[in-house]
Amino acid sequence: MANRIVIGVLGSCEPAQVERAIAASGIDRTQLRVLTAEDPTQEHEDSPISFVHLGEFAPESLDEEMMRGTGVLSDFGGMSVPGINTQESGFSVFDHPEVADYLKGINIPSGDEEYYNEAIDDGRCVVVCTCDGTACDATVQALEKAGLANVRTF
């Protein structure tokens, strides 16, 4: 069976607490990454856990970012009405653009993706593990027992 992803949320990104939780889970730490919006510290660097520091995401379009806040009409979308005469019609104008897509490239449903992205924005860590076949059930149980929340397999 192909590799799958198990993902869950840990309330703290403090390296010692993450290390304790992962050690309690019994999961091989080479099989996981811990996503955090925190800036890297020496404790993160010294940790045996692989932290991925997401930091600030670059804007999708640098020219749009350069014009933002200048007061130019295009700064506010020009003469267009969102959802009516823009290229993107529909309900996408009601999406949550303030939530960064940290999990881009991981194949999980958008509603679930939004939850994990918001967890990162709120200062929690998202633990992402790879597993194979029946090992995924044991991985989910181990992470839940270690105190992670909303542990799911994708």
Image: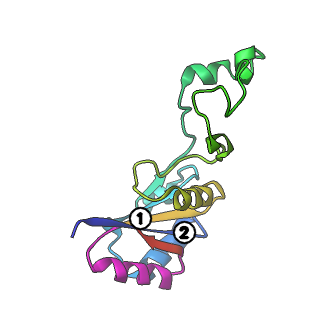
The residue tagged 1 is 49
Distance from Cα at disc 1 to Cα at disc 2: 15 Å
Answer left or right for 95 relative to 53. Answer: right
The residue tagged 2 is 9
Does 136 appear in magenta? yes
In this view of the protein, which residue sits in the foreground, 60 or 124? 60
Answer left or right for 3 relative to 82. Answer: left
Answer left or right for 45 relative to 80. Answer: left
In this view of the protein, which residue sits in the foreground, 57 or 26? 57
| Tag 1 near tag 2, CB within 8 Å | no
Name the residue type under label 2.
Val
Seen in the picture, residue 48 relative to 36 is either above or below; the reply is: below
User: Picture quarter containing residue 84?
Assistant: top right
User: Picture quarter containing residue 30?
Assistant: bottom left
| Residue range corresponding to the magenta coloring | 130-149
Color style of the picture: rainbow
Who's the residue at 52% across and 55% down the image? Answer: 110
